[in-house]
Structure formats: structure tokens, C-alpha cells
Image (cartoon, rainbow, N blue to C red):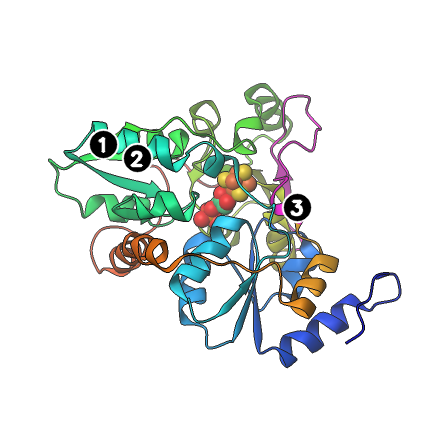
Amino acid sequence: MKPVTNLAGVDLRAEIDRLRKERNAVILAHYYQKPEIQDLADFVGDSLDLSRKAQATDADVIAFCGVRFMAETAKILSPEKIVILPDMDAGCSLEDSCQPDEFAAFRAAHPDHIALTYINCSAAVKALSDVIVTSSSAEKILAQLPADQKIIFGPDRNLGGYLSRKTGREMLVWPGVCIVHEAFSETELMKLKAQHPGAPVVAHPECPPVILDHADYIGSTRGILEYAMAMPGDTLIVATEPHIIHQMEKALPDKHFIGAPGADGNCNCNICPYMAMNTLEKLYLALRDLTPRIEIEEGLRLKAKKSLDAMLAMASATVGQGDLGPRPGVVTGD
Ligand code: 13P
Ligand code: SF4
């Protein structure tokens, strides 16, 4: 096919549809993707569900509309597939905060600890870990570890701190943060709550404790969506990346969903700049050219797969609880 350099005349949706059939490709998208990407994806989900889909698909190509660590996870679990990421620069501040050599040194300094590691990290850090967790599986996985097992938790200090407070388990927590969830302002959130008395607040556990303290529900993106679907009231304040609101508005057009504000009350600082790098144009080009492609050296892949396999097995085990869940004793409706 002749390369198209000017995409102005291209019907991107139709072309993406044609290419997905021609390539036998599946398009997986995270809830933080732009609405136009969510709407044409074959599956939209949280990190755990996207990993499961990537493992189970019989497509030849996985077009991953998310960030690099998610596409890497898909490749680790499905090495025979071609995995493309529309923009290879779509990284993550949590991944950046945890460099493999520093993490290896931290592990070496604590030889009697196991490494329970958030999926938001590189393949190299996964290879240095024992069990990977997502926000929807962390508590259930933690509950399956012996009570006297010493634990290193990285790289998200907010998720680690939240898990420690909720379960009473002490953990050595790596000091990484998500720049998006760190940007919410407590002052602005309190102003918003005063404007909408009775509206519950939902928050992702990547938020700092000052934000989580105001939340009626804390959970993964899937958990937050499930809370929205079940809430009795008509207004919800959402403290996570605001593109998730697209799914809420589609399912519940008569309800009102308000993104929690950042420091000046109306900045775009809660939009994940990495997730936003993916566009329809880049997705079209990636499907057309089958690049940028995720490649992982086989030795590294096999090491990283062990900790991901442990996560998938423990997340599906029929013990413990499911998602991080509502906090006990907190009123969740209005
Ligand atoms: P979940 O979708 O698993 O809640 O993760 C959120 C996130 O930070 C993705 O980068
Ligand atoms: Fe990383 Fe935060 Fe963006 Fe998720 S929202 S990809 S944790 S920077």
C-alpha cells in the first residue's frame, strides 16, 4: 500500500475497522483513553481485565491503546502475537520512578522480603518481582500471603500506603507516585463537595491519603465504574483520570459526573499525558504498518512472566475478597 503522509482525507474509523479485520487484530483500550478510542475498541477495561484479555485472545495482532507497561504485559503473556502501541513514548511516571538497577539494590538489601509489585512498572522490574498486583487484585493477593511474610511494595507509595492502612500489613514501600493522581487538590475537592452536598466521592488508590480521606469508595477503574452504576444518587465526584467519565456518561446519561479538580480548580493536570499520546491517527498508522511493536528479549520475558502468572493465578483464586472495596462503615449513597 502507498504510504499516506497526509491523513486529512482518510476516514480513520473506517480504515481502522478495515485494517483490524485484515490483520485479525484486537483493539484493547484502557478507561483513561480518549472517548473516540474507547468507542472503537473491541474491549475497554482496567489493568487486570486487559491483561486477561491479552492472554486469552486468538487475534494475531494486539493493538494496545494504553501505556507501554500495559502493552509490554500483553507481549509477556502472549509472545506469539504482534503487539503494537500507537505511541512508544506513552510511558508512566510510576514506571519512571522505579529503575531496575535501583530496585534490584533495594531487593538485595532486604533478602527476607518478597517483592509485591504494582503492574505499573517495566518488564525489567516485573522480572525482579515475585508477584504483580493491580489495584483490583492487590488486596485479594495480599490476603493470600502468610501473615509473617515480609513484603516490599513498589512502585506506588499511595497504593502501598492505602493497602497497609486497610489491611494492617506492614510493608516496605517504594516512594513512587502517579503524577496524575498526585495533582488533585484537597481544597478544591472540599469546595466541590460543598457545592454538591450529598454527592459521594470515588477515588483511585493512586491518590494521596488527603484525597482518599474524603472518598466514599476507593477502588480500581473497574471498581469505580461499578460503584457509579449502582449508586442511588444522581451526582458523583470522580477522583481519577477523567476520561473514565466517558463510560459513566454513556451508561447513565441522566446522571451527573464531575471530575475532581487539580490545584487551580480548573487545570488539565488530571489528564494522563502518557495515555493522551495515543490518537486515532497513530492507531491507524500502527495497524497499517504494524509498528511501533513491543519486543522483549526472551530471557527477560520468561522472568517477568513468572510474577504475572502468579498474579493471574492469585487474582482468580477462590479465596479472600475481590476489589479493594468500600471502606467499612462508610456511607456510600446520598
Ligand atoms: P486500573 O485500571 O487497574 O485501576 O489502573 C489505573 C492506572 O493507573 C492505569 O495506569
Ligand atoms: Fe501512569 Fe498515572 Fe498515567 Fe496511570 S494515570 S499511566 S499511573 S502516569
- Residue under the image location 41 percent in, 55 percent down: 48
Q: Whole-percent x and y of residue 297?
A: 41, 57
Kind of residue at badge 3: Ala
In the image, the segment drawn in magenta is 253-277
Kind of residue at badge 1: Ala
Q: Whole-percent x and y of residue 35?
A: 68, 55
Kind of residue at badge 2: Ala
Provide the residue designation for mark 2.
Answer: 104
Mark 3 / mark 2, whichever is N-terminal: 2
- Residue under the image location 75 percent in, 59 percent down: 281
| Quadrant in which residue 153 is drawn | top left
Provide the residue designation for mark 1.
Answer: 108
Horizontally, residue 27 falls left or right of residue 169, namely right
Q: Nearer the viewer, mark 3 or mark 2?
A: 2
Residue found farthest to the right: 9
Q: CA distance from mark 1 to mark 3?
A: 36 Å
Disc 1 packing (10 Å; few <14; some 14–19; many ≥20): few
Q: Is 214 placed above or below 41 here?
A: above
Provide the residue designation for mark 3.
Answer: 276
Horizontally, residue 126 falls left or right of residue 260, namely left
Q: Nearer the viewer, residue 37 or 10?
A: 10
Q: What secondary structure prevails in the magenta region?
A: loop
Q: Is 220 placed above or below 155 here?
A: below
Do tag 1 and tag 2 residues touch (Cβ < 8 Å)? Answer: yes
Indicate yes or no whether the magenta region holds residue 56.
Answer: no
Q: Nearer the viewer, residue 315 or 112?
A: 112
| Quadrant in which residue 240 is drawn | top right
